[in-house]
Image (tube, rainbow, N blue to C red):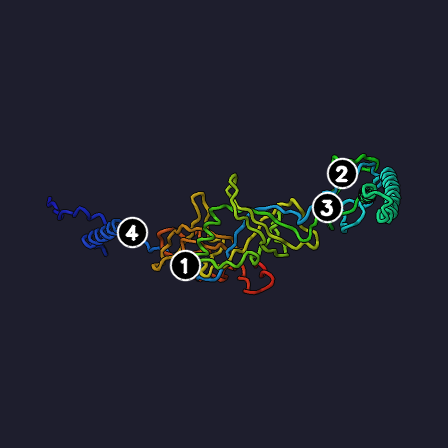
Amino acid sequence: MTRLHHAPRPADAGAPSIGRRPFARTASARIAGIALLLAGCGGKPTPQAPPAAEVSIITVSAQPLVNLIEVPGRLQAVRTAEVRARVDGIVQRRLYTEGTDVRQGQALFSIDPRQLTAQLSGAQAALARAEATAANAAQDVDRYKGLVAQRALSQQEYDAAVARLRTAQADVAQNRAQVASARLSLGYTTVTAPISGRAGRAAVTEGALVSAGGATLLTTIEQLDPIYANFSQSSGELLALRKQMTSGAIDLPTLNRIPVRLVLEDGTVYQQPGQLDFLDLSIDERTGTAALRAQFPNPQRTLLPGQFVRARIEAGVRPGGLLIPQRAVKLAPQGATVLVVNPKSVVESRAVTLGSLQGDAWSILSGLAPGDRVIVDGLQKAVVGQPVKAVAAKAAPRAVPVPVAGADAPAPVAR
């Protein structure tokens, strides 16, 4: 029997061989794996730096600024008169309305005049008796003068008659003074206003016994137009002000030309400006301050004695003053600071010394110079040491207008 021999079958003979290339497929897989490996091992792309934050700035410039000094104080009437009793008696009537304006010489109270009327009548009677005695003595002298010339009367008797005449004339003068005093006391039974002003509440009522010896207080009159405002300034600040005047940093006018404005308790500014009229030349040892006083017109009686106020004294002009908006200043217990943009557009922090608050801006005494760029908006985006994009702010800070030299009234404060 003849055996048929077949050729050996390849290991992959069971798989179809049509269109397959085992070596090409293996190379492609390797290339794909290398590509995936390279993609997995490759570094991340470098991130781009964020754009610089945009902030609004103002460029500080020198300008004439009013040197404002703000101090607390209280109002005081220009004149205050305490109306007191000058005679003893019973108050019959109150002749004025409490809390109203009275004029000088107006009747305020009526005191029972009957006792003083009787005293005046007694003084007048004593005067009449003294005048009669003096007239009789004068007749005796005239009669004795002729007798002495005829040597019918001694010189001694004549001299005695002259002495009696002079005594009688002195009694007349004394009694006339007593009549005048009694008449004056009788006039005091009608109590009149010594000054014009606003009369306060009555301290006595009808039927009250008043005494001249005890100087019983009846009421008080205060003159309210104009009105005084009293302040005080520390000796150190006055010394610094004098140094600035000497160096030319402040141009200060004469005392009676320094305008003052009042800020009331509710924060409103009193519309009528006043002027400083008194500066004490001595320092109070207890407080270390000097007293100042300003006078203000008060036609509407808006200002009242004893009222607490704050005075804004326009103490001269700073020719090279610096002003920045209030919102640009950061206040802290360590002091005031601002953020500035340097020439390299990098944020810097500056410590500054603040002057007065003028409108919505601070005056700067030190820490800044003309040309510095101060950040006013975008402070939350500005980081010290980081660059920023500076854009000019839309509005510039407002200041108190500088008074015109020679003007009769101070210029209004910009608010």
Q: Secondary structure at mark 4?
A: loop
**At label 3, which amino acid type do we have?**
Ile
Residue 70 location in percent, x, y? 54, 50
- Determine whether label 2 and label 1 are within 8 Å by CB: no
Question: Which residue does the numbered mark 2 point to in the structure image?
Answer: 203
Do residues under tags 4 and 3 come within 8 Å of each other at their CB atoms? no
Give the SS element for disc 3.
strand
Q: Residue at x 67, y 53 (%)?
A: 226
Can residue 112 be seen? no
Query: For the residues carrying marks 4 and 3, which lies nearer the camera in this image?
Result: 3
Amino acid type for the residue under numbered disc 4? Lys
**Along the horizontal axis of the image, is 244 left or right of 291?**
left
- Considering only vertical position in the picture, is 133 above or below 389? above
Among the two numbered marks 2 and 4 on one chain, the one whose residue lies closer to the N terminus: 4
Name the element at disc 1. strand
Q: Which mark is residue 44?
A: 4
* Closer to the camera in the image, 194 or 212: 212
Label at residue 221: 3
Indicate the amino acid at tag 1.
Answer: Arg
